[in-house]
Amino acid sequence: MRSATDQLKGGTRRPTGSLLTVVSLALAMLAAGAIGLLTRTSSTAKTITAARGPVSVPPVIDTGSLSQVIANLQARLRAVPTDWHSFGRLGQAYVQEARVTADPTYYPKAEGVLTRSLRLQPSGNFEALTGLAALSAARHEFAAALSWGQKAISINPYSAEAQAIVGDAEVELGRYQEAFGTFQRAVDLKPELSTYARVSYAWELQGNVQNAIRAMQLAVQSAGSASDAAWAANQLAELYWNSGRLDRAEAWYRDAIGRDPTFIPPHAGLAKVEVARGRLGPAVRDFGWVVNRYPAPEYVIALADALAVAGRSIEASRQYALVHAEEELFRASPPGWPPPRPSGVAGRASRWPTRSPGSSTRMPDSRTLSPTRTRRFGSGRGTPSSSSTGA
């Protein structure tokens, strides 16, 4: 069997049928480096179905207990203030904490400790370079993310995390063919949830939703925790929703909730399925549950739209007013805000009811790819849960 690199250079799209075989064999074969999930396609933009946005960087530190990681690193640096490795890892942890909590005050903290790490060790400082790449991506500074990520790869070309950051930046900059190759290298290096998710996204950008679904199924299978599996299941539900398969979408939203009931996006996913089925009462109830726990603009807009369709115009107006107030706060906030949008339905700032399931759109270029319509990935879930939002 040809290697992934050979397939990429050969320019032959893998038939969908062969990927059905891949589903049952991929975990074992990928561990041996035997296959690649991506193939090069024509550079011509293809019509795709409701493409999700580009992905975000996975964490490059253990996020089992992020607050404990931060506390331990801070204690280490109080004892050894010249430990540039720990400064780099602390910066990475701050970036991840900003993603999880949606608190932009962690960005300047991250920048400060990463810059200090680089001052202490200007040469070969992989931790600081990777952290600065992640920070730039989180701030939607994608040219800088690409530059920092490429410097990190020059030090450690075998880092799937650094490859993933570069691929994310390439997507945001409209460099799709380069991004597909980068994602292939990432999954070859480390077949896991975050790299399978990127492969899924790359297949979707190429217009092959079925292969995108297969890759996301591998992401679900490779999840290392219930919360990560819930995240991947929600992404799989989004793929089914975007292709108009409401029954499958609903089943996977429920699967995600069953794996982690505190994870908010699949609750919003179920609510939009209820709207599509005309069940406006349950939809309003469920969107209200979501907004009470995480009042992101996307969710507030969805609740307002559901109220408006249900004829509850006064209540809808109140929710729209809340969105306008949030937008004013965003404009008055410091650089780095708004933070990266959450995954799935929460990753779209546009009103989801204006695009019916199964509608198609052209693949966006660098001018139309909005960072507020992004799908965010990582081996640790950077999306809201009711427990992390004080509910």
Image (tube, rainbow, N blue to C red):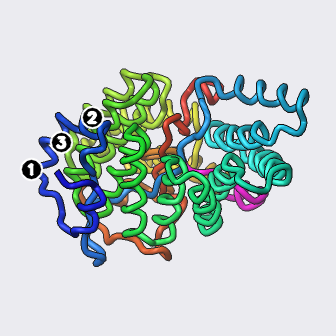
> Is residue 41 shown above or below 380?
below
Q: Which residue is mark 1?
A: 17
Q: Which mark is residue 22?
A: 3
Q: CA distance from mark 2 to mark 1?
A: 17 Å
What quarter of the picture does the C terminus occupy?
Answer: top right
Foreground: 84 or 171?
A: 84
Q: Secondary structure at mark 1?
A: helix
Q: Secondary structure at mark 2?
A: helix
Question: Residue 322 in the image: x percent, y percent?
Answer: 63, 49
Q: Which residue type carries mark 1?
A: Gly
Q: Is residue 51 left or right of residue 225?
A: left
* Segment colored magenta: 327-341
Q: Which residue is mark 2?
A: 27
The crowd level at tag 2 (other Cα within 10 Å; few <14, some 14-19, many 20+) is: some
Name the residue at 62% across, 28% down: 388
Task: State whether residue 103 appears in this view.
Answer: yes
